[in-house]
Amino acid sequence: MKTRGAAALILTAVMFATPALTQDMAKKATAPKPAASPSQAVLDSWNEIGRKLIAMAEDFPEDKYDFKPTPAQRGFADRLLHVASVNYFFTNLAMGKRPPAEEDPKREQYKTKAEVVAFVKQSFADGASAIRTNGDAGMAKLVVDPDANQQVRVSDLAYGFIEHAGEIYGQLAVYYRVAGLVPPESRPKK
Protein backbone atom coordinates (compact mmCIF):
# COMPACT_ATOMS: atom_id res chain seq x y z
CA MET A 1 0.00 0.00 0.00
CA LYS A 2 2.76 2.42 0.87
CA THR A 3 4.38 1.76 -2.50
CA ARG A 4 1.20 2.64 -4.42
CA GLY A 5 0.81 5.88 -2.41
CA ALA A 6 4.41 6.81 -3.04
CA ALA A 7 4.06 6.00 -6.75
CA ALA A 8 0.88 8.11 -7.00
CA LEU A 9 2.61 10.96 -5.24
CA ILE A 10 5.59 10.78 -7.60
CA LEU A 11 3.30 10.57 -10.66
CA THR A 12 1.37 13.62 -9.47
CA ALA A 13 4.58 15.56 -8.88
CA VAL A 14 5.85 14.68 -12.38
CA MET A 15 2.55 15.73 -13.96
CA PHE A 16 2.70 19.15 -12.31
CA ALA A 17 6.44 19.63 -12.90
CA THR A 18 6.37 18.76 -16.62
CA PRO A 19 4.70 22.02 -17.82
CA ALA A 20 7.13 24.08 -15.74
CA LEU A 21 10.10 22.18 -17.13
CA THR A 22 8.79 22.57 -20.68
CA GLN A 23 8.40 26.34 -20.15
CA ASP A 24 11.93 26.62 -18.72
CA MET A 25 13.34 24.67 -21.69
CA ALA A 26 11.45 26.93 -24.12
CA LYS A 27 12.86 30.05 -22.43
CA LYS A 28 16.39 28.64 -22.66
CA ALA A 29 15.89 27.76 -26.33
CA THR A 30 14.98 31.38 -27.14
CA ALA A 31 18.00 33.64 -27.33
CA PRO A 32 17.92 36.52 -24.84
CA LYS A 33 17.37 40.00 -26.18
CA PRO A 34 20.62 41.90 -26.70
CA ALA A 35 21.60 44.57 -24.20
CA ALA A 36 20.64 48.13 -25.01
CA SER A 37 23.42 50.26 -26.44
CA PRO A 38 25.07 52.67 -23.98
CA SER A 39 23.14 55.67 -25.27
CA GLN A 40 19.85 53.75 -25.46
CA ALA A 41 20.25 52.60 -21.84
CA VAL A 42 20.77 56.20 -20.70
CA LEU A 43 17.92 57.43 -22.90
CA ASP A 44 15.52 54.80 -21.54
CA SER A 45 16.28 55.81 -17.94
CA TRP A 46 16.07 59.53 -18.77
CA ASN A 47 12.73 59.13 -20.51
CA GLU A 48 11.26 56.92 -17.78
CA ILE A 49 11.85 59.39 -14.95
CA GLY A 50 10.77 62.20 -17.27
CA ARG A 51 7.51 60.36 -18.00
CA LYS A 52 6.79 60.01 -14.28
CA LEU A 53 7.50 63.66 -13.46
CA ILE A 54 5.54 64.93 -16.46
CA ALA A 55 2.59 62.76 -15.39
CA MET A 56 2.73 64.35 -11.94
CA ALA A 57 3.04 67.85 -13.38
CA GLU A 58 -0.01 67.28 -15.57
CA ASP A 59 -2.04 65.51 -12.89
CA PHE A 60 -1.58 67.61 -9.74
CA PRO A 61 -4.44 70.10 -9.31
CA GLU A 62 -3.51 73.62 -10.37
CA ASP A 63 -5.07 75.09 -7.23
CA LYS A 64 -2.56 73.05 -5.20
CA TYR A 65 0.51 73.89 -7.31
CA ASP A 66 1.96 76.03 -4.50
CA PHE A 67 1.18 73.39 -1.86
CA LYS A 68 3.94 72.73 0.70
CA PRO A 69 3.83 69.78 3.14
CA THR A 70 5.51 72.08 5.71
CA PRO A 71 6.19 75.82 5.61
CA ALA A 72 9.97 75.22 5.34
CA GLN A 73 9.65 73.23 2.10
CA ARG A 74 9.37 74.46 -1.45
CA GLY A 75 5.99 74.33 -3.17
CA PHE A 76 5.02 71.57 -5.59
CA ALA A 77 5.57 73.82 -8.63
CA ASP A 78 8.93 74.98 -7.23
CA ARG A 79 10.13 71.36 -7.06
CA LEU A 80 9.10 70.82 -10.69
CA LEU A 81 10.80 74.04 -11.78
CA HIS A 82 13.92 72.96 -9.91
CA VAL A 83 14.19 69.57 -11.59
CA ALA A 84 13.46 71.04 -15.02
CA SER A 85 16.06 73.78 -14.68
CA VAL A 86 18.70 71.44 -13.26
CA ASN A 87 18.23 69.14 -16.26
CA TYR A 88 19.97 71.83 -18.30
CA PHE A 89 23.13 71.40 -16.24
CA PHE A 90 23.32 68.00 -17.95
CA THR A 91 21.93 68.99 -21.35
CA ASN A 92 24.14 72.03 -21.80
CA LEU A 93 27.33 70.23 -20.79
CA ALA A 94 26.48 67.23 -22.97
CA MET A 95 26.04 69.60 -25.93
CA GLY A 96 29.29 71.47 -25.27
CA LYS A 97 27.60 74.59 -23.87
CA ARG A 98 28.02 76.45 -20.61
CA PRO A 99 25.74 75.38 -17.76
CA PRO A 100 22.86 77.71 -16.89
CA ALA A 101 23.67 80.78 -14.80
CA GLU A 102 21.06 79.99 -12.15
CA GLU A 103 19.72 76.76 -10.73
CA ASP A 104 16.12 77.63 -9.96
CA PRO A 105 13.89 79.97 -11.93
CA LYS A 106 11.47 82.07 -9.94
CA ARG A 107 7.89 80.86 -9.64
CA GLU A 108 6.77 84.23 -11.02
CA GLN A 109 8.37 83.30 -14.37
CA TYR A 110 6.00 80.32 -14.66
CA LYS A 111 2.69 81.56 -13.30
CA THR A 112 0.37 78.82 -14.58
CA LYS A 113 0.30 75.06 -14.41
CA ALA A 114 0.48 74.96 -18.22
CA GLU A 115 3.72 76.99 -18.19
CA VAL A 116 5.30 74.73 -15.57
CA VAL A 117 4.23 71.57 -17.43
CA ALA A 118 5.61 72.94 -20.70
CA PHE A 119 8.98 73.72 -19.05
CA VAL A 120 9.23 70.26 -17.49
CA LYS A 121 8.36 68.59 -20.81
CA GLN A 122 10.82 70.72 -22.73
CA SER A 123 13.66 70.05 -20.27
CA PHE A 124 13.26 66.29 -20.62
CA ALA A 125 12.84 66.52 -24.40
CA ASP A 126 16.02 68.60 -24.67
CA GLY A 127 17.92 66.13 -22.50
CA ALA A 128 16.69 63.20 -24.60
CA SER A 129 17.76 65.05 -27.74
CA ALA A 130 21.23 65.61 -26.28
CA ILE A 131 21.54 61.90 -25.47
CA ARG A 132 20.46 60.90 -29.00
CA THR A 133 22.77 63.50 -30.56
CA ASN A 134 25.76 62.24 -28.57
CA GLY A 135 24.99 58.60 -29.38
CA ASP A 136 27.04 55.71 -28.09
CA ALA A 137 30.43 57.33 -28.73
CA GLY A 138 29.30 60.54 -27.04
CA MET A 139 28.35 58.70 -23.85
CA ALA A 140 32.07 58.09 -23.23
CA LYS A 141 33.02 61.70 -24.04
CA LEU A 142 34.56 63.59 -21.13
CA VAL A 143 33.15 66.89 -19.92
CA VAL A 144 34.11 68.96 -16.89
CA ASP A 145 31.61 68.99 -14.04
CA PRO A 146 31.91 72.62 -12.90
CA ASP A 147 30.71 71.89 -9.36
CA ALA A 148 33.37 69.24 -8.73
CA ASN A 149 35.93 70.66 -11.22
CA GLN A 150 36.40 67.10 -12.41
CA GLN A 151 36.16 65.33 -15.73
CA VAL A 152 33.20 62.95 -16.00
CA ARG A 153 31.78 60.82 -18.78
CA VAL A 154 28.57 62.13 -20.31
CA SER A 155 26.82 58.88 -19.34
CA ASP A 156 27.87 59.24 -15.70
CA LEU A 157 26.72 62.84 -15.69
CA ALA A 158 23.37 61.76 -17.15
CA TYR A 159 22.88 59.05 -14.56
CA GLY A 160 23.61 61.57 -11.79
CA PHE A 161 20.84 63.83 -13.07
CA ILE A 162 18.51 60.87 -13.58
CA GLU A 163 19.09 59.96 -9.94
CA HIS A 164 18.42 63.58 -8.91
CA ALA A 165 15.14 63.55 -10.85
CA GLY A 166 14.25 60.30 -9.06
CA GLU A 167 14.81 62.02 -5.71
CA ILE A 168 12.47 64.83 -6.74
CA TYR A 169 9.92 62.24 -7.86
CA GLY A 170 10.04 60.67 -4.38
CA GLN A 171 9.60 64.05 -2.74
CA LEU A 172 6.61 64.86 -4.94
CA ALA A 173 5.04 61.49 -4.12
CA VAL A 174 5.06 62.64 -0.49
CA TYR A 175 3.48 65.97 -1.50
CA TYR A 176 0.68 63.96 -3.14
CA ARG A 177 0.09 61.85 -0.01
CA VAL A 178 0.18 64.77 2.41
CA ALA A 179 -2.31 66.60 0.16
CA GLY A 180 -4.61 63.57 0.38
CA LEU A 181 -3.96 62.48 -3.22
CA VAL A 182 -2.57 59.33 -4.84
CA PRO A 183 0.40 59.71 -7.22
CA PRO A 184 -0.27 58.54 -10.79
CA GLU A 185 2.23 55.65 -10.55
CA SER A 186 0.56 54.34 -7.37
CA ARG A 187 -2.92 54.12 -8.84
CA PRO A 188 -4.31 50.79 -9.97
CA LYS A 189 -3.57 50.11 -13.62
CA LYS A 190 -6.55 49.84 -15.94
Image: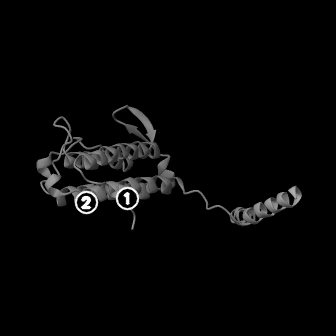
Which percent across, then down, holds residue 1?
88, 59
The residue lying at 49 percent from left, 57 percent from top is 40
Instruction: Find the distance from the CA under tag 1 to the CA under tag 2.
Output: 25 Å
Q: Report whether residue 167 is seen.
A: yes
**1 or 2: tag closer to the N-terminus:** 2
Residue 59, numbered circle: 2
Quadrant into which the C terminus falls: bottom left
Q: Report whether residue 97 is seen.
A: no
The residue lying at 33 percent from left, 59 percent from top is 125
Which percent across, then down, holds residue 45?
44, 53
The residue lying at 35 percent from left, 43 percent from top is 167
Which percent across, then down, holds residue 146?
34, 35
Question: Label 1: which residue?
Answer: 129
Residue type for callout 1:
Ser
User: In this view of the protein, which residue sits in the foreground, 117 or 139?
Assistant: 117
Quadrant of the rendered image containing residue 4 = bottom right
In this view, the mark in front (1 or 2): 2
